[in-house]
Image (cartoon, coloured by chain):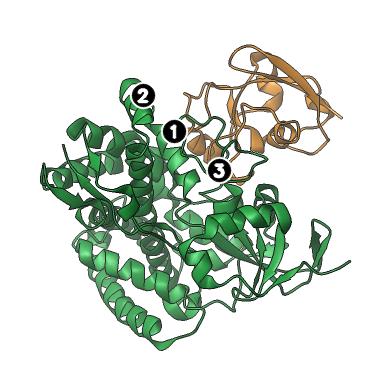
Chain colours: A orange, B green
Amino acid sequence: MPAITFVSADGDRTTVTAKDGESVMEAARTNNIAGITAECGGAMACATCHVYVAAEWADKVGPASDPEAEMLEFAACEPSETSRLSCQITLGPELDGLVVHLPEAQV
Amino acid sequence: MALAPFDDVITIDHLTTDPYPIYKRLRAEAPVLRVKSVGRTLLTKAADTRAVKDNPELFSSNDPGTPMERAFGAHTLMRKDGEEHMRERMAMAPTFSPKNLKTLWGPAYEEAAKAYLDRLPRGEIVDLFPALSGPLAARILAIILGIPDSTDEEMQFWSQALIDGAGNFGWADEPFERVDRANKAMNAKIASHVPRLKADPDQSALSVMINADDPIPMSQIVANIKIAIGGGINEPRDALLTILYGLLTNPDQLEELKRTGNWGSAFEEGVRWVAPIQASSRLVTEDTEIRGFEIPKGDVVMTIQASANHDEELFDEPEKFNAFRKPNPHQSFGSGPHHCMGTHLARMMLGKIMLPLIFERFPNMELIDPDSVVWRGFGFRGPLNLPVRLN
């Protein structure tokens, strides 16, 4: 049951307990985290679940795949090297304590 | 467990002329309702429409009972699931890349938009449906698809024929006769561009599909082009007219937008308020339940995104047009694997390019008698006319 912290663009921190195997996007949606839209429901088709993985977690989370990186170019806010589509990050015990930063806008 | 309640009072005519009050009542009283005239189980709550679209194994797009295959002369990707769907979708995807949107289609749209706006008369009443919105949607799509010598009239005729054919649930003769004519013309037009694009490839949809390393069958390439024609003209046409109606009937919001330039937000609100595609169907593959009602295998559910977009649990005063509405979790582009492929293109063309441009050109545009604007449509919906004076 990994814990994940969402840091809004304003700096507000919300920590939630996610389920093993669910995506970061799903954890956000279940917990009504405002800064993630996830319009396509996790199909990697819309780029509205964009997150900036906190620097210290980037290696553990890993980089975006090629198709994911392509979709990230559609993100409303400029992606960084640690940007991911949160629907593509699967949570498990190794990501317990993960911190992600939310962009100012998803659309 | 009981089946969902059954209604034999609502008619298709009601749904076509004035659906929103019906959906409002259904959300409150019967969010899962078997409607006789439609032959489907209507789902009017946002949580349900999203859950259905996000579960393609249980709610399949592959419904052989629809007129689409007859109309299109093909089994299109819209009616497929799983890997086969994804393969056909990905075949066209390169055309819609962020790079192409920024470097090719954005500039092409801006050039066409300016030319079409230049043609519009100032100071007199003009109906933007036939004068601007329809033709411009047709023009840019012809370019993006790789059939640029198609006229605006042809593209619009083909689009409507495909839509009417696919929607011909009464299995009447006329819509099929018309779409058969359209198919003949589209097939010829597409074939005429193949040699050119093989010799001189570009980023258009036809080109990327025929020149792929591992191409999908030609029948599916043609089907994809037709899906784009069916899906890529009426929707941006209606979206633009709906947004303009919303802005021109809310001048205070329009003034604020001219000041802040946040046209993207106005775009999202327009498509939420009157979703250009109001409803979609899915075939139920196993016995299941929604809100405690039994939904048997073989049933066809209809997700009413028009209603999801007005769900009181998500939206304050949903019947009001509010260009600054935040958050705006509408479902007008769908959800799940079939999420609209034209989403980013539509947001760019209308939200980033057309809206600022048209109000820069005609800052005092005036809507002539809002009550004279006719709204129509059950599956697809928008204004049939938008008479304005361009000042």
Q: Would residue B243 appear left or right of B367 to someone viewing this image?
A: right
Which mark is nearer the camera, 3 or 2? 2
Q: Crowding at label 1, few (<14), some or many (≥20) Cα neighbours within 10 Å?
A: many
- The image position of residue B279, as x and y in percent, is 55, 60
The N terminus of chain B: image quadrant: bottom right
Residue B259 in percent (x, y) is at 32, 21
Question: Along the polypeptide, which appears first: circle 1 or circle 3?
Answer: 1
Q: Quadrant of residue B103?
A: top left
Circle on res. B330: 3
B368 lies above or below A15: below
The residue located at (61%, 73%) in the rendering is B63
Q: Is mark 2 on a helix, strand or loop?
A: helix
**Quick one: quadrant of the C terminus of chain B?**
top left
**SS class, disc 3:** loop
What element does badge 1 sit on? loop
Residue on which the image places disc 2: B256
Residue under mark 3: which chain is it in? B
Distance of label 1 from label 3 (alpha carbons): 13 Å
Disc 2 sits on a residue from what chain?
B
Q: In the image, is residue B102 above or below residue A34?
A: below
Cα distance between the residues tagged 3 and 2: 22 Å
Q: Nearer the viewer, residue B287 or B362?
A: B362
Front disc: 1 or 3 = 1
- Across and down, in percent, residue B116 comes to 16, 47
| Residue indicated by mark 1 | B323
Number of marks in the image?
3
Task: Give coordinates of residue B354: x percent, y percent.
Answer: 28, 39
**What amino acid is at disc 2?**
Glu
Q: What's the residue at 64%, 39% (across, down)?
A: B314
Q: Which residue is drawn at 49% across and 64% down?
A: B379
